[in-house]
Image (cartoon, rainbow, N blue to C red):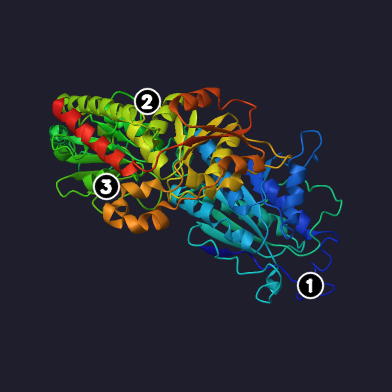
Amino acid sequence: MTEEAPELPGRDDAPAAGSPSAHAAPTGSPSAHAARVLLQALARLGVREVVLAPGSRSAPLAHALAEAALPDGERDPHAPGLDLHVRVDERDAGFLALGLALAARAAGHPRPVAVVTTSGTAVANLHPAVLEADHSGVPLLLVTADRPHELRGTGANQTTQQVGLLAPAVRLTLDVPAPVGRPGEDRDLRHLASRAVAVAMGRRTGDAGPVHLDLAFRDPLVPDGAPWPVPSGDGLTEVLARGSATARGAGAGTAAPPAATAHASAPLVAPAGAARVDTARRAGGVPTVVVAGDGAGPLARRVAEANDWPLLAEPSSGARGGPNAVVAYRLLLPEPDLGGAVRRVVVLGRPTLSRPVQQLLGRADVEVLVVAPEGELWPDAMRSADQVLTEVPPLLLAGGLAGDVAWLSRWRRAGSSAAAAVRGVLDAAPALTGPAVATLVAGATGDVLVVGSSNPVRDLDLVADWDEPPVVLANRGLAGIDGTLSTAAGVALGLGRPVRAYVGDLTFLHDVGGLLVGPLERRPDLQVVVANDDGGSIFASLEHGAPEHARAFERVFATPHGADLGALCAGYGVRHVRVTDAAGLRAALAAGPRPGAGTEVVEVVVDRAGRRALGDALAAAVRGAVADG
């Protein structure tokens, strides 16, 4: 939505001589002063990281950020300390900010990250990252500089309609007129900052996401030598999340996460009396599985283990581990005694990877319970949810619907058989395949993994077998291949430790600009593993890859590129290693990522020609193994 800030006097409506505010405007740069006040307010509200893409109209913010990024002892005593990252490409800047925000959330300290751009097409280049942040609930502050209102619609250089440009993907748009130094202007800026941060964090709605602050600036755009203003809380508003006031009153300081509150009123799981409890407990014998999609968190694992239910967890769910997690579950769902016998599914997170999972959720004979603690909408792509809860009910947390242990044992045995069958097929393959690369990456990663869309995340979903999973992050809001390298760099910089990324070649090429880090910038410790099969092999496993479409397939779906990844890396000053077999990949994975090593690209040459046949062989092997088991 768009909210206009209070109108400020412009060049043509300055106060008349002799009026109370006739001499209120400073003689220096109101734009530079306002930029400093805004940064002070954002820092007070919890912003720590800012990503800047260069430009002239955003110069007031750029100068202020450069000063705020100085080390302690060198900054003006009233300048806040901020962590600044500079990128020349706005699209990369947006995804870097997204990665920084993902890192803060993964570390348990969610906070908004600001990205600053100049006017014109710079703003439009933020849109892919904004869309991802919108659909994945990541708090971003999009601080875009603009021409003053009197220049809009006049054909002025680099001037377009920026207000509303990023809608409807933003939670709020604030159109801020150019500062003139009027009384109360600083207070208004602080109030706008408070509103922007509160909305981005979803404090009142539980629906975190991006917020757009469009700031008009007039010349002069450079600081005038004046010191920073004394920080003030005038205009700042503390916006508490739902439940925070109660928690504070009890001395807790912060409210418990919604997912752990354990309260609900849905018929199945929130009994109104003893009879309902008995009914619910008798319902525990219904064959049930837990589906953990992206962002489900460890709560999904807790629910599955408390009730002796199989856990079908995507890699980026945060729940894929423990004794109930089933490997290669998507190949087991077509089995009549496994997927075919399911009668209830408890969904946490947002499942997006598997057609068999979606088919399960869409079946008329399956009851679907969705737990969606955040956001206005809930995940239900098949439009089949019977109940939608904002919190996990106490009955599920306590194991009140515990099922037949034989049901879980059947899935465990099948999962073990399926995993062995998959390994057998991959070991027998004449060349290195995508799932084989995923197996080695999964086995070698013990800390943090950022995984790209398309085949890499699906291959990981097929083979990853973790007792305790690493932190796995992915841009699954819209599941695009945009900005993945920049996102991974933001995660590494935000966490302050080495991170591994696993992507396909098209994903790598789509964001190769993310490798560009200037010599004055802090470099992420990042190892990027690229499964290079020279094209979009995911389409081979879909209907487009069927033999009858072979004539069109290679050009319009597979899109071979023939790019020299090593030469690209050399151009960006990034180390590059090319491997063609499992032994070479094992050695490269063992060598990194490591602290202080910067960015390294490990290119793994993968066979694409047999991708469809490999999928068929894996499915057949799993069917045979389950039948024999």
Q: CA distance from mark 3 to mark 1?
A: 63 Å
**20 versus 345 height, above or below:** below
Q: Which residue is mark 3?
A: 358
Q: Determine the secondary structure under disc 3.
A: helix
User: Considering only vertical position in the picture, is 544 above or below 146?
Assistant: above
Q: Between 194 and 105, which is closer to the camera in this rendering?
A: 105
Mark 3 surroundings within 10 Å by alpha-carbon count, few (fewer than 14), some (14 through 19), many (20 or more): some
Mark 2–mark 1 contact, CB under 8 Å? no
Q: Residues within 10 Å of mark 2 (few under 14, many from 20)?
A: some
The amino acid pointed to by label 1 is Pro
Q: Which residue is mark 2?
A: 466
Q: Residues within 10 Å of mark 1 (few under 14, many from 20)?
A: some
Asked whether, in this view, residue 555 is left or right of residue 602, the answer is left
Q: Is residue 459 above or below residue 477?
A: above
* Along the viewing direction, whichever of 504 and 2 lies nearer the viewer: 504
Looking at the rendering, which quadrant does residue 69 occupy?
Answer: top right
**Label 2: element kind:** loop
* Label 1 sits on residue: 15
Query: Residue, x 57% and y 55% (percent of image)?
Result: 126
Q: Amino acid at mark 2?
A: Trp
Earlier sequence position, callout 3 versus callout 1 = 1
